[in-house]
Image (cartoon, rainbow, N blue to C red):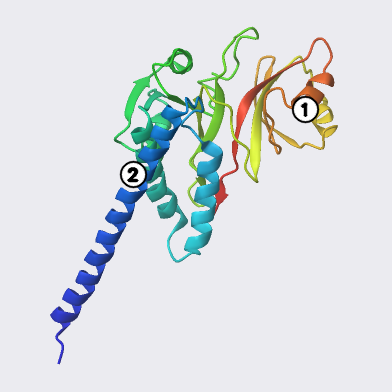
Amino acid sequence: MVSKQENLTKFRMQIDAIDDEIVTLLKSRLEIVKEVGRHKAKNSATDSFIRAGREADMLRKLTQKADGAFPPGAVTTIWRTIISTSLCTEQDMSISVYHSANNQDCFWLAREYYGSFVQTTKTSSADQVVEDVAKGSSSIGILPLNDSDCVWWSRPDNEKNDIYIFARIPFIKDANQPIAPVVAIANVMPEATDDDVSIFVAKGFDEEGMLHNVFSQLDTNIMILSKQHDAWLIQTDRFFEKKSGRSQQLNGLLDSQQFLRLMGAYARPIKL
């Protein structure tokens, strides 16, 4: 007769064997990532190592495959760590994070999303975060999406850089645990997925209805996230990218006093 202890030992051996398989597969995955890095270097590829669209598609598929048998939040946390490890293997990665006495979410969400092993620098200046990314001392910046104490998105009209929002953190949206989202910025154009939103800053619009009217002409719905003085922070239900036909159409609908700045786009989060 098999004792309870022998049963436990058998189960633990099975778990250990599975753990060994997981480690072996992770090592194999990392070797392929290294091959990708060597391939890019050999072919002088200039693409950014940040592939937010691919990452979002990957997480959506993995959570679907888990089919509720494994918690979606756990799936995304595990694979975010795997993805970040791969990114750090492919290229050096560092993060500049907005951090203040009233807002510490950026730091903790950045650690959860990218991993505690990624070099992360805190600063109480949102402008410093943007500057760190613009000059290349940080690969990624983390800023609040909508915080009345940190209106970083109201940029000078003549500011010249190629920095865009490319991801929303967290990627899981749990109605039972509401968390004010933060955004990741980098010197990279966002990638489209099957379900995205875009972020704009608008100026020269006296009323909210004027904004709805402009975007509705492109069959696009908007949500007003914030208004500070003459600037509106807007979320759209469509993917926009700089210099695309849709963006040119949008700009063609503006009068001489109106201004739209595309701040970026990101994959819509998974809802629990």
Q: Quadrant of residue 158?
A: top right
Q: Nearest the camera: 137 or 206?
A: 137
Circle 1 SS class: helix
Circle 2 SS class: helix
Disc sitting over residue 63 in the figure: none
Three-letter code for the amino acid on which mark 2 is drawn = Glu
Q: Position of residue 61 (x, y in %)?
A: 53, 54
Q: Quadrant of residue 253?
A: top right
* Residue 226 in sight: yes
Q: Position of residue 125 (x, y in %)?
A: 43, 15
Q: Nearest the camera: 51 or 271?
A: 51
Q: Nearest the camera: 209 or 13?
A: 13
Q: Position of residue 245 (x, y in %)?
A: 77, 27
Name which residue lies at 49% across and 55% down: 62
Q: Quadrant of residue 157?
A: top right
Q: Residue furthest front?
A: 42
Left/right placement of residue 136 relative to residue 243 reads left
Disc sitting over residue 31 in the figure: 2
Tell me which numbered mark, 1 or 2, is placed earlier along the sequence: 2
Three-letter code for the amino acid on which mark 1 is drawn = Gly
Left/right placement of residue 95 relative to residue 229 reads left
Q: Residue furthest bottom?
A: 1
Residue labelled with disc 1: 245
* Residue 98 in sight: no
